Image: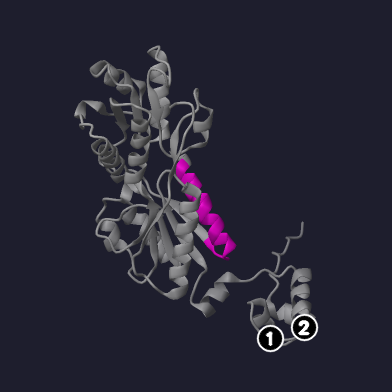
Amino acid sequence: MASRKPARHVSVKDVAARAGVSFQTTSKVLNGGGTVSEVTRARIHQVASDLGYVPNLQARSLVMQRTRTVGLLAGDFSDQNLSRLIVGAEREARRQGYGVLMTSIDLEVSGTEYALPSLMERRVDGILLAAPQMEEDRAVARALDKTVPVVSLHHIAGGGVATVGSDDELTGLLATRHLVAKGHRAIAIVIGPRARRVTQDRLRGYRKALEEAGLPFDERLVTDGSDGAATVELLQRVPAISAIFAENDHLAIGVLSALRDLGKRVPQDCAVVGCDDIEMAAFTVPPLTTIHIPFYETGEQAMRLLLEMITSGSVAPRKLLLPVHLISRGST
């Protein structure tokens, strides 16, 4: 059996020869430039389409000194909120003609040991960091090439990196204010890992709302844990609790389950507020009151900022906070 020859890529020279136009002019037109008549421009693009011409990005990057590729370093891809951020970022990059090279970090190995060097070795034009596990890793700032624009969705130790996110202290403030406005005075909070900045910020907002209302902060009303046992123990410790703010919706769903197991009605016996506004929040029983965090828009805005920095050549750090708002549902 005769071996099949590999398919030959259509080149700019092929398009130029078929269109009857010089190589230089054809190249400029296919790259979005060139001073030619609209008839000639249309003929070049039609020939390119007929021949199945695909731009050679490697060759173009040598000329433009850019790869039109950005790197995206993420944490756990299975995290629903992170996925919404990534989708927003990737679609914005694609809209502006950039490809995205994505990689994740191994929780057992620092991202600075292989992930960041790997992206920089591939000559990406910029890097978007979406890995909360790296927010206290001081090696991250040292590992970054200071000439490559970087935007992070989380704090980077040492600063010097542009960030895009939401005001997490405000989320805790809005949630707790809502419960205070409903007449609640014994308001508990269920938090995630205490070392995370988002946890500390939302806890700070909770305390600020209590202070505004003239209510004392009571450490007994604070518990951390993702299972219902934490909620059960919390209510056994302080039976007077009439409302609970869970710092994210996954924790809030666990609270709802624990309250149901205890025979408590929501919101009559205990109101619940979550945070993030995941898709499932509208379909819990009862539907969950929550703080909407614009994850998709955050990813989109972060990528837009990164591409602006690439175009301008600026690496100066900026900080953007997107608005959040409360969505009131049946759980309060």
Q: Nearer the viewer, residue 287 or 101?
A: 287
Q: Is residue 218 above or below residue 13?
A: above
Q: Are marks 1 and 2 in contact (CB under 8 Å)?
A: yes
Whichever of labels 1 and 2 marks the residue nearer the N terminus, that label is 1
Q: Is residue 13 above or below residue 295?
A: below
Query: What amino acid is found at the position of numbered circle 2 in the picture?
Result: Thr
Q: Quadrant of the C terminus?
A: top left
- Asked whether residue 87 is drawn in magenta, I would say yes
Q: Is residue 55 left or right of residue 229?
A: right
Disc assigned to residue 25: 1
Depth order, front residue of 279/176: 176
Residue 50 point in image, percent of width and height:
79, 70
Magenta residues span 81-99
Query: What residue is drawn where x is 64% and y is 81%?
Result: 33
User: Label 1 to label 2, Cα distance in Å?
Assistant: 10 Å
Q: Residues within 10 Å of mark 2 (few under 14, many from 20)?
A: some
Element marked by disc 1: helix
Residue visible at 29% across and 44% down?
Answer: 201
The quadrant in which the N terminus is found is bottom right
- Image position of 91 with respect to 287: above or below: below
Residue shown at 53%/80% (left/top)?
Answer: 63
Q: Which residue is mark 2?
A: 40
Q: Position of residue 25 (x, y in %)?
A: 68, 86
Q: Work out whether residue 247 can be spotted.
A: no
- Locate residue 115, reporting x and y percent: 38, 55
Q: Residue at x 37, y 13 (%)?
A: 262
The one nearer the camera, 208 or 154, is: 208
* Residue 159 visible in image: yes
